[in-house]
Amino acid sequence: MPITFEVNREDDYYTARVIGQITDEELCIAWEDFLYGQEWAPGMAEFTDLSQADMCKLSADGIERLAKLINGIYQANGVLESKCSVFAPGNLPYGLSRMYAAFSENYPETVRVFRKKIDALKWLLER
């Protein structure tokens, strides 16, 4: 699977790291499996690392489907707000992440996209 998840309980966030090529289907399945799994806790912040991602097979429909999927899981778990910080140094990952942020605009997840990892982590850890 091109996505790995790692939980940082001390700072109450998880890292989703995409390595290599990923499809719409793989993207949604990976997040669904993680969010329905035992490691995720409702309201936990998210750091997404797209520095090694090949996103050329993703579509706008897939990105929108992911936003709706995550919002549905958040609503089912009573999540009223959550932070998602995306590290996307490349142009395609950056643009697709901005699209995800737009699709999530009216959802409880506040999404910010950064080109520099240090800026992404700094914003995420501001409480």
Image (cartoon, helix red, strand yellow):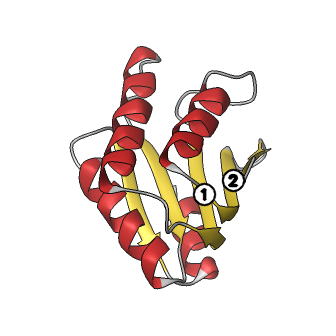
Front residue of this view, candidates 121 and 107: 107
Q: Which residue is mark 2?
A: 15
Q: Quadrant of residue 34?
A: top right
Horizontal arrangement in the rendering, residue 58 relative to residue 101 (left or right): right
Q: Earlier in the sequence, mark 2 or mark 1?
A: 2
Is the C-beta separation of discs 2 and 1 under 8 Å? yes
| Image location (x, y in percent) of residue 39 | 75, 29
| Residue depicted at 55% across the width and 79% down the height | 119
Up/down of 3 relative to 41, above or below: below
| Image location (x, y in percent) of residue 63 | 38, 50
| Residue depicted at 60% across the width and 56% down the height | 22
| Image location (x, y in percent) of residue 77 | 47, 17
Q: Which residue is mark 1?
A: 47
Label at residue 97: none
| Image location (x, y in percent) of residue 4 | 75, 49
Residue type beneath disc 2: Thr
Up/down of 12 relative to 97, above or below: above
| Residue depicted at 58% across the width and 34% down the height | 29
Q: Quadrant of residue 91?
A: bottom left
Horizontal arrangement in the rendering, residue 2 relative to residue 84 (left or right): right
Q: Element under label 1?
A: strand
Separation of residues labelled 2 and 1 (CA atoms):
5 Å
Residue type beneath disc 1: Phe
Q: Element under label 2?
A: strand
Horizontal arrangement in the rendering, residue 42 relative to residue 73 (left or right): right
